[in-house]
Amino acid sequence: MNTETPLPLAAQAAPVAAETTATPPEQSKSCCCRQLWQRFLGRAAGVDPAEEVPVWLLALLSLALLSMASQVKFPFAGGKIALADVTFAAAFLGLLWQSFRRQQSVFYPTLGLLAIIAAAVANSFSRPGISGAIELAQLVQQFFCGMLLFSYFLRHAPFAATVVVSLGLLLNVMAGLSQTVLFGYGSIQAPADVQALPWGFGKALTGFFRSRMAFSFFLAGALVWIQPQWLGRRTGFWRWLAVLLASILVLSFIAHGMMLVLCLAVLLTASCFLSKRAVLLNLLAAVVLVFSLAWGAENAQRSTVLATLNPVKTGDFAGELKTCHLDFLAALKMAGQVPWRGVGSSRYQDCIGRCYGELPNPSYNDIDADTQAGWGIIAGTLGFPAAALLVLLLLLALTGGLRRHLRGGKSDSDSVQALGGAAAVTLFTLGMFISDPLTRGLGWFLALALSAATLPAPGEVICACQQYSGKKIILTGVFLGLLLAPVVLRSRAEDPLRGMSAAVSRRPARLAPAQGSGASIALSDAEVFLVLNATQVQEFTPPFEKYQDSLAAEKTALRILDGKGVPPANEEPSMQYGGALFTFELPAAVAVKVWVRTWWDGSCGNTLNLKMDDEPRSVTIGNDGT
């Protein structure tokens, strides 16, 4: 006999109802997370399982791309090994293994290979030695191996690439925020101090990069690449608002004025190809930045951005003179001396000082590293033919990305990825008139932009010569290695600008003699000539010191050891930071030229300033390789 008392129907139904009403939100949340994870893995509906990226390879690709958003180096082996070099090597070996195992091919544009070959041939004739071969190998690493890696990543897991670049931007902005608090918004370091950093970054507003210029270039390039992908073709209000706030945050840390203006111009232009909401977003971001820079109390951001805003400022401007056009003009002069082959990779700093001529050299204490124009460096070191091939590659990538975007592709993500690639290629092309992106960190993102812009749409017919299997990748690598062999084996050219020596070695103008100074003097009715040696110094302050040198006059010289004598930020070089005083008299008011003989210990970060009598500020008479 059943003695259990049955529950009322409502009581029985209540738990069931409660259970059924609680299930749909949980299922919806779980389903959303699962969909995002599947998108991250590149496993969308309709994708052939054979084309899916293994999780282990996706992890290697993501780690490599994240580390490429930096210039972090290891504090051993002289800082020659970067973090991105190690992660890239692991990811590239994984890609080769996957290509052999699955018989997959990767797209690579033929013109990119031609540009690398042109650079190798130019170096074979210019004979830069082992240092030039190392720079050329880095070019192969980034623009052959790197573009193969990015083409595979963007084809098979585009959403994951977007997430990783977003994370790289976020980490750099967070680092920039902490550096602003610790060192100030406008903080920079001299090149010699940058090279001394054990991990390659820090002690200034640099993010995970070595200089403020490189940090600004990275933020601009990454933002114009990723913003179209953040927005997409159909953008809701909350997503639009989040992208607006994120864009303003990133733009506010672009401390270089010219790079900030260039970034805003490219963003506005790219948004015209996307949607009206995208145009409105970038207009609002520009208005916010202009308002913060033009009105309100004086602040470090305003002074820093405005000081680097004018691309053609001259020697009487106390801003960063190395960001102006003078260095680019000197580089073009150098390229004009050896137009077909250049002076060779790694020889730029050795030769650029002889090409300034009557152009004023940059002022030391306003120098931020990485502010020499990339186009000038390419033309000067590789010659005009190789530079022209690179220009052609960038223009074809730009037009190809726009064409693919306007056609719409097969998916929304493919279309906006092409637009982002075209926008980033535009920014890098124009930014190379300001700085050089063919370095660690920035070079990877130029390769990423080229890959995104040149990658064909899914289903598009591709020429067989642009499809690279694992075997073809290895054979092409062997071919490029053989091209490097002459650069390594041929002896280093002693003077790439040998024919220019007589043209620039003008006889020094004459100085008046000092009374009773004991100096060597040559006199005539029209001019006087005076030579001052280190033994005749009237006064010198630490870290200047006298030391014995068999090559110097009277075997005595003055020196400042490496890492010493750097004035604080925003301070002029003066005696209190290390200087030497020489005294001489002029019989009458005459125009004079002062020539100083100097030995540089290395070619980067060395500078000599000269101040005459009671002039308000010193003048840089030697910098870098001059």
Image (spheres, grey):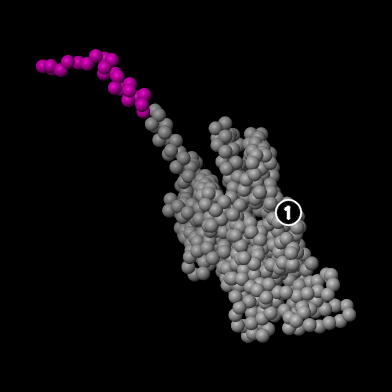
Q: Give me the residue at 33% from left, 21% from top.
A: 17
State the residue at coordinates (45%, 42%): 38
Judged by its main secondary structure, the magenta piece is helix
Type of amino acid under label 1: Pro
Which residue range is magenta in the image? 1-23
In the displayed image of the protein, which residue is found farthest to the right?
525
Q: Is residue 388 left or right of residue 91?
A: right
How far from the left and from the top, in percent, is residue 30?
40, 35
- Residue 606 in sight here: no
Question: Residue 58: image x %, image y %?
Answer: 46, 51
Q: Is residue 9 magenta?
A: yes
Residue drawn at the location 89% of the way across and 80% of the way down: 525
Where residue 384 appears, as percent x and y from the top left, is 74, 64
**Quarter location, residue 436:** bottom right
In percent of the image, x 12 and y 16: which residue is there? Answer: 3
Q: Which residue is mark 1?
A: 311
Q: Nearer the viewer, residue 455 or 262?
A: 262
Q: Is residue 61 above or below residue 597?
A: above
Q: Quadrant of the N terminus?
A: top left
Is residue 408 in view?
A: yes
